[in-house]
Amino acid sequence: MAGDRETALAALAARLQTVVGSLLKIPVSRKLRAWADVDQVDQPALFCVATHDVPSVSPMEPARHTLGAHVVIYARCDADPAVSAEPLLNQLIAAVEDALTPQTGDATGYAWTNLGGAVAYAMPGGPIEYESGAQGCQGIAYFPIELVLVPR
């Protein structure tokens, strides 16, 4: 049986809230909302959602699960259509990367966090995708994260 998925996702959301949310005074939610439903005054906004679970099995070892998550970031520039939301998205992406580095209570032996022991490690999980201009002043980034669960 794999490590606790809910514990891993809750730990990731809590770490994002501590590192990103408190730094930039924005909330982190686990309930994804469409960008059109998030008012400009409520942006920037971060959402942390699970995307997939990939078990790795071996006849001699317990299954090891890699849980995928996306941090979805919404950021609006001011009303000037000549201004891009990309600089703010880049600042938020850097803060998410900072949240994945080892913090107090982490002892992974890796370059990435173990979220205080909730996972073996959590790290970026692929290309970060941007949408920064097609929606006017609305910028959106999708930051994939892999959470390698501790086998139980």
Image: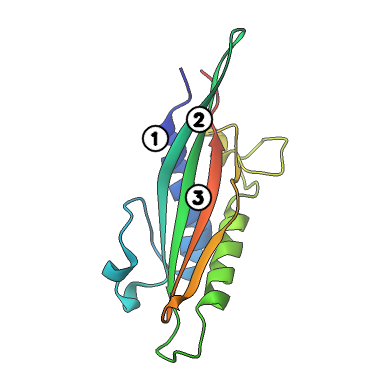
Q: Amino acid at mark 2?
A: Val
Q: Secondary structure at mark 3?
A: helix
Q: Nearer the viewer, mark 1 or mark 2?
A: 2
Residue at position x 34%, y 67% from top? 35
**Is 145 placed left or right of 10 in the picture?**
right
Residue 63 sits above or below residue 136 on the image: above
Q: Amino acid at mark 3?
A: Arg
- Name the image quarter holding residue 64: top right
Q: Position of residue 6 (x, y in %)?
A: 39, 35
Q: Which residue is mark 2?
A: 54
* Label 1 CA crowd tier, 10 Å (few <14, some 14–19, many 20+): few
Query: In the rendered structure, which disc, 3 or 2, sits on the residue that comes first in sequence?
Result: 3
Residue at position x 58%, y 70% from top? 91
Residue at position x 52%, y 66% from top? 130
**Is 124 placed left or right of 37 in the picture?**
right
Q: Which mark is residue 6?
A: 1
Residue at position x 29%, y 74% from top? 39
Q: Are marks 3 and 2 in contact (CB under 8 Å)?
A: no
- Name the image quarter holding residue 115: top right
Q: Position of residue 138 (x, y in %)?
A: 41, 76
**Is 93 placed left or right of 10 in the picture?**
right
Out of 102 and 148, give the one closest to the viewer: 148
Out of 74 and 3, give the one closest to the viewer: 74
Kindly report the distance in space between the C-alpha atoms of the residues bearing marks 3 and 2: 23 Å
Q: Nearer the viewer, mark 3 or mark 2?
A: 2
Q: Which residue is mark 3?
A: 15
* Label 2 CA crowd tier, 10 Å (few <14, some 14–19, many 20+): few
Q: Secondary structure at mark 2?
A: strand
